[in-house]
Amino acid sequence: VDVLLTSPWIPIEWISAHGVTPRGVWALGGHPPVDSAEGVCAFARTAQRLRESHPRTPVIFTTACDQMRRAADAAETEAPSGDVFLFNLPATWQTQAARELYHVEVRRLGRFLRRHGGRTPSATALNAVMREHDQLRSRLRPWSEYAPARQTAEAMTGYFNGDPLPDEVAPQPHTGVPLALVGGPLCASQWGLFETIEAVGGCVVLNATEPGERCLLPPMPADVPAHCGTAATKRPGTRTKDVHEDDGIRCGWQRFPVAGIDSEVAATPADGDGLDVLCDHYFDHVVDVFQRPNSPLYNWLGPRLEARHVRGLILWVHVGCDLWRAEAASLREAFHLPVLVLDSTDLRGGGLRDLNRLAAFVEALR
Amino acid sequence: MNAPPRQLALNEWGPRHVELVRQGLREPAYGGPLARHVEQQGDVRLRHLRFDNSPAALRLWNFLLTENDRLRAARGQGDKLVGAMKDLGTVPVMACALPGLRAFYPDGAWWTPCLMECSDQLLLQAEALGVDASFCPVRAMLGAFQSDEHFPHPDLLVCSTGAICDDFSAIAQRLERLGRPIVWWEMPRRRAPDPDESACGLPGGLTAPQVQVDCVRQELERIGRELGSLAGCALDEPRLRAGIQAANAVRRQLQELRRTVYSSPAALLPALEMLIAEMLAIHFCSDREESMRVLEDLTAEARRRMKAGQFVIGPNAVRVFWVNPVADLRAMNLLESCGGRLCGTDFMFAHALDLIPEELPGWEALAGTALADPMVGPTRDRARRIVTECRAQRVEAVVVSRIPGASHCPWEGAAIRHHVAEQTGLPVVEVEVPPVCDALLPALRTRLEALMEMARARRAS
């Protein structure tokens, strides 16, 4: 059984453990561009219409943005079938209430999966899937350091699509002006962007789009499930101590204030099942623009931009996506780097206009 | 003092005010001639509006247009100011339950470019701060915070987040990055309970899973502690319940006003004044007691006119339901000049028109009411309520007014239109109203007139 997934912040381990194959919508490279009403994000519109191309395949939306939650509404209203699941992703992350909401939604997703052919996973099975995915992510994680951006994007998208990972990727030195690609969903049909950037002398050394590097969770606690924090025991306002936050301090990069976080407090060891560990791990490591405040995104970006000597940001924004568009000025101010806003009007690759704009941007950075 | 009802231009209100004063009109401290708002505040849009000629309407307008002055005066007297953002009707209930706190909506700055016909430069300032015209006009709030020339800076900024529109979420986040700390609280997207979940009834005939109500309750309790800390006085259950009862008194008064005006055979008050009056339900214009008196006056005026058989718009006007607030107030005048009258509304805060259950524990009741917000649930819930009200008020046509740049409008406009047309067969039109709609007036007029034409044709058949 396949299930279409529209967000990297839903535990694919939980889906897989139900015997269901998650299919990340970013991989739908052959999907034709769709017409879009004024102000409607092309990604959300495509997600809404997935059931036309994938009838009877359940689709999991999230509330990460207004556009996607309304796309879910529209999909369900147009053809009520019970195949649409809208996962309530909390925007806040500082409170026990938000954490519990996330846990509740994961369990509710389990019931949805079982209604659609999934089976109840045993604790052992879930733990095995968690370890397997942890290993897959561990293999993927270093790729971004040395592999070509496009190959990494392909591998990341494959990971969220249930595809096997390539055995190995040959290291390739990054040449060209080092750039970070930051923003919303980047689909397979849009990967030509990497070649376009390289053609004009740039090189993506940090892919922070979706499902790029920022969607790759850090390693699970080493002793899962014996040591695990649970929803009931985790202190409100704490996030698991994150190596990236340490990086921010070590690099001398000025971290943004993270309201309500005590970065010295690690996950509290306690009794609990693997699902609680999984939920906490995801909840604690969301790095996205929709969070309020979205300081985790900036804290994640900061050390990486510095470590990879990034000289410019390309902000990848779907037309109609207010959340990413509004960050252009904040990103510029925060990192003192030039920002080029690249609009995505549909799910096709960039055209001549993008090429010209990118060429001018890279030329100015040389 | 009780002249036959009619709509006046601003320059006609001057002599009318003089006449009322001569006849013994007693005004509150914020009273006075309307034209002073043009001269002193630059609210030049007033010159292009038509106002109801009653003393009650005068009081309403003066109350609205003096909010910033009244907030400054309150601060001068030692009150603390709470900037409530986005929740539309929840945090002010809590803030007003505590002594020495006043809540207002910085979101309200979205009408400033309209009132000042963009001479305030707020939209340009927002653009300079990275929030351009692709965003909803509420971006004016960003300019207002930065310019420091409109509302006073709040002592505490609170913003609901989660199931809210992207525009507002993005603009508020930008505001925080510019150095305005915000206390965020989570508003889950309302959904129907699963069969195996404990369900909770909400105002407006809605339901939600108990876990969602619990989530919002916990969040509101947290905000309550912030407010209590600011006030130096805990927001305990008795205080909250008293606050809810007082808020319900305002809501009951507004319900009575709406029932009187919308169910009458012809319009007792104009659409523009009804829009402003309804807004009082969500923020009390930062003075709950005075907002009650303003609504009482309006209701009394409507009843007096009803008894006298006097109407501000003739009986043949088409009965219109209006969806979403307009960025340009002039659009409400336009409705009437095209042959319509307001008989029902959903200005995005239908939940604030419903009574907060008083039989429940306070936090639970407020959480349920907040979750009943039409903007946090499925569009079909909102559309169903619109249909119910259209039937109750014998509505003949529906206007779905889009807010330029708002993330929800492209999706829900079409959905509401489709549902209403399917369920009622009523003619529906979508219009988009920018902060100053003068350039679009011919197109707007054409669309509205066509709608009235359709409605009258249905009458004839």
Image (tube, rainbow, N blue to C red):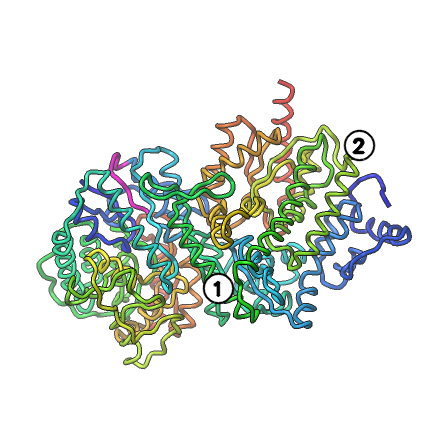
* Residue drawn at 28 percent across, 56 percent down: A9
Quarter of the rendering containing residue A149: bottom left
* Residue drawn at 25 percent across, 51 percent down: A188
Determine the chain carrying the residue at label 1: B
Image position of A116 (left or right of A348) = left
| Label whose residue precedes the other's in the sequence (2 or 1) | 1
- Answer few, some or many: residues within 10 Å of disc 2's Cα (few below 14, many 20 plus, some between 14 and 19): few
- Label total for image: 2
- Residue A58: within the magenta? yes
The residue under label 2 is B309
Check disc 1 and report its element: helix, strand or loop: loop
Check disc 2 and report its element: helix, strand or loop: loop
The residue under label 1 is B130
Tell me whether circle 2 and circle 1 mark residues in contact (CB < 8 Å).
Answer: no
CA separation in Å, label 2 and label 1: 53 Å
Vertical order, B207 against B63 (above or below):
above
View extreme (right): residue: B22
Q: What range is drawn magenta here? A: A53-61
